[in-house]
Amino acid sequence: MAIREVLKMGDPRLLEVSRPVAPIDAETLAPLLEDMWDTMAAENGAGLAAPQIGVTQRVVIFGYQTNPRYPDAPPVPETVLINPEIEALGDAREDGWEGCLSVPGMRGVVSRYRDIRYRGFDQHGKPIEREASGFHARVVQHECDHLDGILYPFRIADLRRFGYLDTLIGQGVIELQPCDDEA
């Protein structure tokens, strides 16, 4: 359908808490979801939350086979997740570099639960329940944070581990090549 503008950090709409989707109606959601998938693909995203395109509903999408922004990340199943809930499976956490389409050109180290269970619904109102670990779990937690008005820089414990991607690469802090959208 359309590639939408991705809101950038500083836009107050990104700080709003999103409202639940009720009722879940595939026909009503179809245009939003098509726009989200188109926008995520155009931006080489690993996921996208509805608030990032100015829609304050509890809807996230994520998934890819390969992703140029995270070339070493394993595939994540393409998923529509509506009204999600996340449960940590244990206390184990992992630090990892994160980026965000709403914070372009930057990366920071964020601690996330290593293992989670997430629940919600697909666009047809069918329940989804999965366990995820590693990068898959990180992506889900990151996207669901958007639904509560939380951007990943808010979760960075040590701001010395936050910076512009091109500088982090140039200084040898991160070993990957920036994508065109992040160069």
Image (spheres, rainbow, N blue to C red):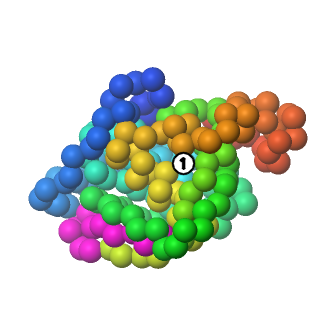
Residue 100's x, y, as percent? 55, 41
- Residue at x-position 13% and y-position 56%: 22
Quarter of the image with the C terminus is: top right
Q: Residue at x 34, y 70 (%)?
A: 119
Quadrant where the N terminus sits is top left
Q: Say whether residue 4 is visible.
A: no
Question: In the rendered view, does 51 fall on the left or right side of 73?
Answer: left
Residue holding disc 1:
45
Q: How many marks?
A: 1
Task: From the viewer's perspective, tell me whether residue 73 is left or right of residue 86.
Answer: right
In magenta stretch: residue 134: no
Residue 26's place in the image compared with 5, above or below, is below
| Residue at 26%, 63% in the rendered image | 123
* Quarter where residue 5 is shown: top left
Task: Give the residues in magenta.
Answer: 116-127
- Frontmost residue, 136 versus 3: 136
* Position of residue 181 measured from the top left corner of the image (x, y, whole percent): 63, 35
User: Farthest residue toward the left?
Assistant: 23
Badge 1 density bin: few <14, some 14–19, many ≥20, Cα 10 Å:
many
Q: Secondary structure at mark 1?
A: loop
In this view of the protein, which residue sits in the foreground, 5 or 103? 103
| Three-letter code, disc 1 | Gly
Q: Is residue 47 left or right of residue 59?
A: right
Residue drawn at x 25%, y 54% is 30
Front residue of 46 and 9: 9
On screen, residue 17 versus residue 89, left or right, reads left
